[in-house]
Image: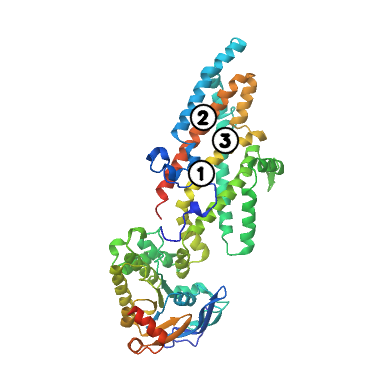
Amino acid sequence: MRPGAEPTFRATDLPVILPAGEAPSHRGFAHRSFAASSAASLRLFTPAAAVVLFAALAVSILVAPAFAQLAQGHRPGVLEMLAKWTPLLFWGPDGEVAGFVLNVVVSFLTMAMGTVLGLFLGLAQVSPREWIRRPAWLTTQLFRNSPWLVLLFYFMLLLPYRIELFGTTIPLPGWAKASFALALPIMANLAEIVRGAINSIPTGQWESAESLAFTRSQTLWMIILPQCMKRMLPPWMNWYQILAMATPLISILGVNDCLRLTRDALAAEGSSEYLIPMYLWIMTWFFVYCYPIARWTQRLERKWSVDI
Amino acid sequence: MNVDNAWTPDLPIIRIADLYKSFNGIPVLSGISLEVAKGDVACIIGPSGSGKSTLLRCINALIPIDRGSILFEGTEVNSPTLDKLAIRKKIGMVFQQYNLFPHRTALQNIMMAPVHVLQQDPAEVEARAWTLLKKVRLEEKANSYPGELSGGQQQRVAIARSLAMNPDVMLFDEVTAALDPETVKEVLVTIRELVDDGMTCILVTHEMGFAREVGDAIYFTDRGVIVESGPPAQFFKEAKDPRTRAFLSQIL
């Protein structure tokens, strides 16, 4: 690492997991105090947390039926109930993309839109032209500092349910509108990552590219951004994980995601004792989906925090 | 490119007249004038902070100047209509920190600019890149990344990268200052060979012995002005200005 080149993670003020040395549970006690402050958020995702989560699920499965039988005579057991609803909650009703699959689809779609928009917004923020830079900065700040749920409500109401384009009608279902709304804060946060990464590349790289007569856009796309990739990937993955966990927000807007279907299922069962196991079951899905991403991000950060 | 038709190769390739440059109101260059003829080597020496590196960056329009004139092959660099890219294609520059592109191999570093800037045929460029690597004695490192090379090796790749553009002039900005003493020599040998091939060079350096050996003219700068200049034999023996003498006595 050259002097003067700050790693991305410190060059931004983003809520990004810092490469704070090692998670204590993996490297013994030597790093414990050193990593203590910034690794606090990581601790949520240690194997111990997984054990606690599964233990809670197991207890609720065992205990809840007892209460159920006390209350109402014969009712199906919790396992039976979960088995009955799982296909619907996971895949959604037939002929419809819904349930947990929809959460994943929305997270992909949102991340794709957010990444493309964020890349260009980040580039706009480092533009030498003030009339590009200033609005880009304002846009970034606006969407970084807005509550996601408010943005969701806002765009659900603002966007039509279909758009007419060259005589064809393109339907705009709720999940598409929700994806767009969620893509905006993702865009703003990724734009900050892009800006931070570009600024963390030593100025000598710009200078030598300029002296070789590369144009500014050639320098950006061929020399600067390729070097940014390694710096951007871990925080990018971190944002994907945050987004994936935030997708149940869309259930409030009437999109048939897994949380919304869970509530429907609970209503159909008409009994509150299934509430805890059912929600824990759904939580487990998100955990199983997101936890490996978090671990992988940590690994990449550790691997890449030293070189370049 | 608005080449002045009056320029011919027997005129100075670079002619700087009364150049002024300041950063945030702090003067860095205060009336620099110098001329470099084709095939000549001008060495600029002086204490750090005397504006040597800034001067080099003004020549290829990396930094805009406040006042004065820089004529490169008859083209005014200090002109709002200047085609900066056209100027930079003809002026090679090598930096103290090498500034190789770390995500590309040595060979790719050399090939990038000719292929993408000059739009030359990649196969031809590659052949030339190999020749250049041979010239700087780094053929076996063609597929190494800059991070795998020593400082001296990186600097030689950087020189080859600039040469791949077939420049008319090479600017060297303290190219050995960041190197270990034992690797300085291999870089100086490379520059020496360039000079022997007739390349026009401007060398900002602290290597007095080397300046004396290869230089056609030595310029001593201090606080943004050229205090004293002359051919090396005369300059190092009969420095008149007390500032020059003080500097030389510290260094030699």
Q: Amino acid at mark 3?
A: Asn
Q: CA distance from mark 3 to mark 1?
A: 17 Å
**Image point 42% across, 68% down: which residue?**
B114
Q: Amino acid at mark 1?
A: Asn
Q: Which mark is residue A135?
A: none
Q: Are marks 3 and 1 on the same chain?
A: yes
**Image point 48% across, 25% down: which residue?**
A55
Q: Amino acid at mark 2?
A: Thr
Chain letter belonging to callout 1: A
Q: Nearer the viewer, mark 3 or mark 2?
A: 2
Image height check: is A252 above or below B58?
Answer: above
3 or 2: tag closer to the N-terminus = 3
Front residue of B47 and A88:
B47
Circle 3 sits in a helix, a strand or a loop, which is it? helix
Residue B161 lies, in percent from the top left, at: 38, 68
Q: CA distance from mark 3 to mark 2?
A: 14 Å
Which quarter of the image is occupied by the C terminus of chain A?
bottom left
Q: CA distance from mark 1 to mark 2?
A: 19 Å
Residue at which label 3 appears:
A103
Residue at which label 1 appears:
A238
Which image quadrant is residue B235 in? bottom left
How has the structure been colored for display?
rainbow
Chain letter belonging to callout 2: A
Can you see residue A76? no
**Image point 54% across, 46% down: which residue?**
A15
